[in-house]
Image (cartoon, rainbow, N blue to C red):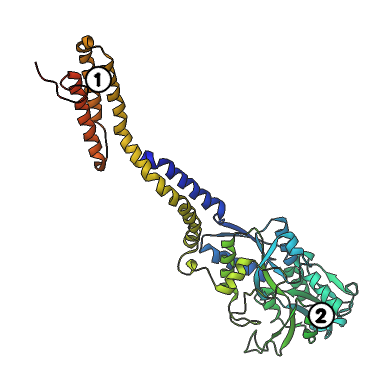
Amino acid sequence: MLVAMGPTLLAVIAVAVLAYLWVDPAPPRKLTMATGQFNSAYQEFGRQYAATLARDEITLTLEPSLGSQDNLERLIAGKADVAFVQSGSTVDGQAEREGLISLGSLFTEPVWLFLRESAKVNHLTELKGKRINLGPEGTGVPRLFRQVLDASGIDPMELQIGALENTPATMALLAGSIDGLVFSSAPEAPLIQMLLQTPGIRLFNFTQADAYTRRLPFLTHVVLPRGIVDLGRDIPSQDYHLIAPTATLVAREDLHPALVGLLVKSAGEIHGKAGWFQQQGQFPSPKYTEIPVAREAERYYRDGPPFLQRYMRFWLANLAERLWVVVVALAALLIPLSKVVPPIYVWRVRSRVYRWYGELRKVEQELEATPSEGREAAREGLLLRLEEIEDRVNHISIPLAYAEELYRLRSHINFVRERVRGTIDMHGRATPKG
């Protein structure tokens, strides 16, 4: 059975292994995510993604960065698999050219312009001559705020723009070294939470927010409700209108499809709750992003998680989904082979018996070729050969279903023996004694 089916089994195993590895390779167990600056919302959300993915045995390495623009450059250079990128960070067609895909928008990142009370600024045109920190170029905030200034008809050269990172800029604002600073972040960022409650520091109110969103389509108008920070102390004491880009989870297009779905699932757990600027279930979303959304992500948003992942752990469900490819390959191979293997098996079993008929035929041919006067001398040698043949035939292992073939062979050995002894003539008739 093993000899008959061995080549078939090897072919089946080879096809199965090739289908398993080549058609849909297993997803990697390690990913790199570019996050953001120390004490930023990006950094905090990165920790949450790492904890969520760890449940499915995926190790997420977090790489601190300057922010959105730096993250985009890391993705393009292949130094990160996935990263947070702010809407408006790419130019037309850049994402497609660089092989980047969106996994969906995650949350709004309002533009927070914090000013010292003494600055007395109520309109952006009053920022002229002020010391305003926009952060390093890699954060994306300088490019974003320059677009806002340009929409307001303000030349950035009319401001004293600083490039400190978030934490030292906050310290400089509190110390009075600068007049204001600009963040673009989710409200969960610790520095924003602190500044919203710091006496002597006030938030700029974008009263023309709707106009800015018309001029800059990647922005949305959001409202910071009165009392949202601290209801008891009525902080803030009024509604604040803000303009906000959207944070997007961006990946390289070669990211494994199974991991795309897993990341979208994690995004739903982390960003799907109601917040200061969003309703329950509003995020994550395939909307609000200028980067093309991955097909697997669109399918997840439309249909939910794959069927098996609703009832199984990620790796078990992924294995089962990949095995469908193997099953199809095996079926395509086994159906034709199932018609070939049985005849081969029968032939292999019967060949153990039939090969001895050749030996018997040789004995008979020698007997017939021996002259009558020499047969007596040759008879002993032929009988010894027949005994050896019979002894070896008695040690043949054969399935019971084919035992009849074995017993027929043994009777034919005895028939040839009787011919050699001379008790049966060449035509199978008994020879009279005497």
**Which numbered mark, 2 or 1, is in the foreground of this view?**
1
Q: Quadrant of the C terminus?
A: top left
Inspect this view and state whether residue 104 appears: yes
The circle on residue 385 is 1
Circle 2 residues within 10 Å: few <14, some 14–19, many ≥20: few
Between discs 2 and 1, the one toward the N terminus: 2
Q: Is 311 drawn above or below residue 8 in the view shown?
A: below
Query: Judging from the image, what secondary structure is the residue with disc 1 in?
Result: helix
Q: Marks 2 and 1, Cα distance to the nearest angstrom?
A: 106 Å
Q: Amino acid at mark 2?
A: Arg
Residue 159: x and y, percent? 88, 74
Residue positioned 23% across, 13% down in the render: 378
Q: Quadrant of the N terminus?
A: top left
Q: Is 241 drawn above or below residue 331 in the view shown?
A: below
Circle 1 residues within 10 Å: few <14, some 14–19, many ≥20: some
Residue 272: x and y, percent? 58, 76
Q: Amino acid at mark 1?
A: Arg
Inspect this view and state whether residue 200 appears: no
The circle on residue 215 is 2
Residue positioned 72% across, 58% down in the render: 76
Taking the image as shown, residue 176 lies to the left or right of residue 85, namely right
